[in-house]
Image: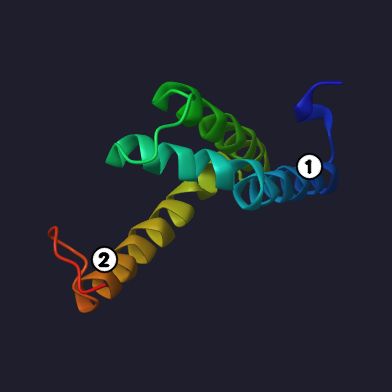
């Protein structure tokens, strides 16, 4: 069956499943992946995994979620999602700026 033949409800369920997997990966497998990647980037506590390997693990989980989002959100509605993303990114930057964590500074 082609994904486009699936009902909207089935596509939404698939998105939920992929999002759960991404969340699970982030809190389990990806937690290790992200920690290893951070160690690689800081050149601290060496790991046998390469930066490329760890990035690919992360990107694979992200890709699963993006594929489902693409199939669940009608193309005509993508500008709405994009506008929301722009606003959320602006709020995130403001929070970081307020915490002194933007422009390379940190108070942590």
Of labels 2 and 1, the one closer to you: 2
Q: Secondary structure at mark 2?
A: helix
CA distance for labels 2 and 1:
31 Å
Work out whether mark 2 precedes mark 1 in sequence or the reverse, and give the earlier one.
1
**Would residue 52 appear left or right of 18 to someone viewing this image?**
left
Using the image, tell me which numbered label, if any, was put on residue 99. none
For the N terminus, the image quarter is: top right
Q: Count residues near mark 1 (Cα–Cα under 10 Å), then give few for <14, some for 14-19, many for 20+.
A: many
Please identify the quarter of the rendering in which residue 29 is found.
Answer: top right
Using the image, tell me which numbered label, if any, was put on residue 93. 2
Query: Please, which residue is most extreme toward the bottom here?
Result: 98
Question: Which one is nearer the viewer's eye here, 43 or 37?
Answer: 43
The residue at 49%/25% (across/down) is: 49
Q: Position of residue 72 (x, y in %)?
A: 67, 43
For the C terminus, the image quarter is: bottom left
Please identify the quarter of the rendering in which residue 41 is found.
Answer: top left
Q: Position of residue 76 (x, y in %)?
A: 52, 44
The residue at 58%/29% (across/down) is: 60
Query: Please, which residue is most extreme toward the front here?
Result: 45
Residue under pointer 1: 14
Task: Give the color scheme: rainbow, by chain, secondary structure or one colour.
Answer: rainbow
The residue at 63%/53% (across/down) is: 27
User: On screen, 103 above or below 62?
Assistant: below
Question: Which one is nearer the viewer's eye here, 78 or 107?
Answer: 107
User: On screen, 33 above or below 85?
Assistant: above
Q: Secondary structure at mark 1?
A: helix
Q: Count residues near mark 2 (Cα–Cα under 10 Å), then give few for <14, some for 14-19, many for 20+.
A: some
Q: Position of residue 53 (x, y in %)?
A: 49, 23
């Amino acid at each position: 069956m082609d994904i486009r033949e699936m009902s909207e409800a089935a596509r939404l369920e698939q998105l939920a499943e992929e999002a759960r997997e991404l969340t699970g990966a982030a809190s389990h497998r990806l937690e290790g992946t992200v920690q290893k990647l951070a160690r690689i980037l800081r050149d601290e506590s060496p790991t046998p995994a390469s930066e490329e390997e760890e990035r690919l693990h992360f990107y694979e989980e992200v890709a699963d979620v993006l594929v489902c989002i693409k199939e669940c959100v009608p193309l005509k509605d993508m500008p709405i999602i994009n506008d929301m993303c722009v606003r959320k990114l602006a709020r995130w930057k403001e929070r970081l700026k307020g915490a002194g964590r933007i422009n390379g500074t940190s108070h942590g």
